[in-house]
Image (cartoon, grey):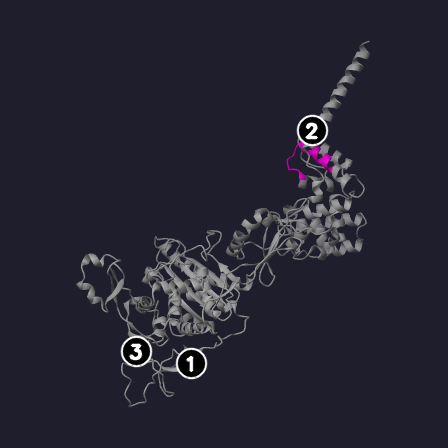
Amino acid sequence: MVNTRKIILNFVLLILLLAALAGYFRQLLKELPPIENLQSFVPRQTTNIYDINNQLIAEFFTERRTFIPLNQIPIHLQNAVLAIEDDKFFHHWGISPRGILRATINNLVRRRIAQGGSTITQQLSKVIFLTSERSFRRKIKELLLTLQLERNYSKQEILQFYLNQIYFGRGAYGVEAAAKTYFGKHASELDLAECALLAGLIRAPNYYSPFNNIQRAENRRATVLARMRKLGFISADEERQATGEPINPGGSYIPTKIAPYFLEYIRSLLAPKYGEDLLYQGGLSIYTTLDIKAQSAAEEAIGRLVEYDNLRRSYFENHHSSPVPVQVALVALDPRTGGIRAMVGGRDFRQSQFNRTYQAQRQPGSCFKVILYTAAIENGYSPTTILNDSPLVYLNDGRDWRLAAQTTDYLKTLPKEWLKDPMKVWTPENYKKKYFGPVLLRTALEKSLNSCAVQIIMNISANRVIDYARRLGIKSSLTNTYSLALGASDVNLLELTQAFGVLSNYGIRTEPYAIVRVEDKNGKILEENVPQETEVLNPATCFVMTNLLRGVVERGTGRYARNLGRPCAGKTGTTNEFTDAWFVGYTPDLVAGVWVGYDDKTPLGEGMTGGSLACPVWTDFMKKALREKPVLDFPVPSGINFCLIDRRTGLLALKNTREAYLEAFLSGSEPKSYLPAPGQVLPSGTTFLYIPPPDEDGF
């Protein structure tokens, strides 16, 4: 009777236990992700960024991966992975009882989940569907998922998923990324020794990495090759030959330090359109306008200025003063298309992600005079227009500014309270307060004479200058005041460089752009951009301005740019108190702008001008960026007349005139009077002009 009761009780307990286990497993099954998701599972893939020549320059990723089909993965690599990770893969049903038994004993001894008996299918279920948590509950989920994977997918499909998903170290996920990272080639190009090395990394990527320990990597590779030979995948001769091959790691891993400001710029353009997930995980191909050679040239040129600044700061630090680092920015465009060829937004992206090529608004100083003089040339002025460079005094009568005197002595007659009010009295000063009397318009631009610039804007109006600024691409807010002629309104480097590019491109404004096209992982074009062109100036006007700005380089404030050794034009800019130094210049095929200054507008120091700071950076950059390009000159468009001009008077010169030079004019704007022959009377009203020496400074 007692035995019968015990049997019944035990049977009931067994039924209850089985019911509990069934309920437990039913609950676990509910928690499992749908196994059908694997068919539509899209692994995180690397987005590749290319330069204008289709050279890979960078990658966006959360997991660096490029998915490839199994038929593009070498059979040696497949066999190497099977040999070292799961040699019974094609013979078991997803679970290895022997491996589980071995792991169970080990875990019981250590009293924790310390080791798994994982097959390839188990590893795949874990990395795709589960967390890395070590618990019996998660382990049971893994086993259930494994069984479902084996029931729903072929061995080839499971192996393909696995080889594209597994981590190989150094940020590489999947065999294609691993092949590029460790050997700089596609997975399909790997030899036996390379396949064995990659397979050996899976168990412990950092520990067996050849970048960390060559000897350890060689030993691990030998273990894989021995397993392959033992399983009949390779012969003894193949094993011996592969084991003896040297390991030379050095793949194509691309650090994000290349063009970081440009990469962040295109990220900021694309992320709002496509979202961060697609951008970093969708395997996009982004083709950009960047030229990696030009970008390298830009970073090298800026690096030299940074080295100089570091030495200067070291001196100050040793003398109990530590100024903040000076900042520098450079942007270069193809003036014919608007494509951004180089972009450096600051001295160190790691310290500051603020991109000073387009996010910083600063006064351009005399660089803005290029826009002023362009407006002047199209509104009655010519290169030989005579301007009176003198210390002018302007008074504001409440309606507008008017010229009160051509000498600062006049200031002594004004009430003191007027002198303290900048809205009543204005005395624009030249650099070092030097004035030269009557000068040619060409000289005024080459020497960047402020007094002459103010006379021009007062004559043609600030509104007209603003109109030309808009035509040339300046979008920043501009103040309708005469001080605009001296660059008193803030602009950014990118738009100012674009404006100079219009002159290089003979009146065609092209909008700056960075992205040529974006393709999805299947090669479908998501967006494609083409140059946007607008005709805004007469080509002849642009040639006259280019001819004038070549004088800035040859004789004026941008003389350092003569070291470029090819035809170029440009303009320096320096703001009050030396807070900003600029140089923007161009050749027929490249326009670039450089800005140097402190973010907090601390003065750079006495004499730190656009000519001494920014122009050398520009010249160094252009030398390297154009090194492999043919030397081009600016072609002469229709509507241009060349005349021999007497530099002393601005009159048409005779062939034997000593101070003669060849000047370009808009047809019809050239002088009408000739310099008389020696001994003859000069025309009435002729003025002898100041001829500056070639080494004279200016702003």
Distance between the alpha carbons at the discs numbered 3 and 2? 98 Å
The rendered magenta stretch, by its main secondary structure, is classed as helix
Image location (x, y in percent) of residue 407: 22, 68
- For the residue marked with disc 1, what is the amino acid? Phe
* Camera sees residue 286: no
The part of the chain drawn in magenta is 129-146
Q: Residue 27: give its label.
A: 2
Lateral position of residue 48 relative to residue 90, left or right: left
Is there a contact, CB below 8 Å, between mark 2 and mark 1?
no
- Mark 2 vs 1, N-terminal side: 2
Secondary structure at numbered mark 3: loop
Residue 117, image quadrant: top right
Name the outermost residue toward the bottom.
679
Q: Which residue is mark 1?
A: 642
Residue 412 place in picture, x, y as percent: 18, 63
Report the quarter where the N terminus lies. Answer: top right
**Considering only order in the chain, which callout, 1 or 3, is on the residue closer to the N terminus?**
1
Q: Earlier in the sequence, mark 3 or mark 2?
A: 2
Quarter location, residue 362: bottom left
> Is 205 left or right of 366, judged from the image as shown?
right
Q: Is residue 261 above or below residue 93?
A: below
Q: Is residue 140 magenta?
A: yes
The answer to if 526 sits in the magenta stretch is no
Q: Amino acid at mark 2?
A: Gln
Amino acid beneath label 3: Leu
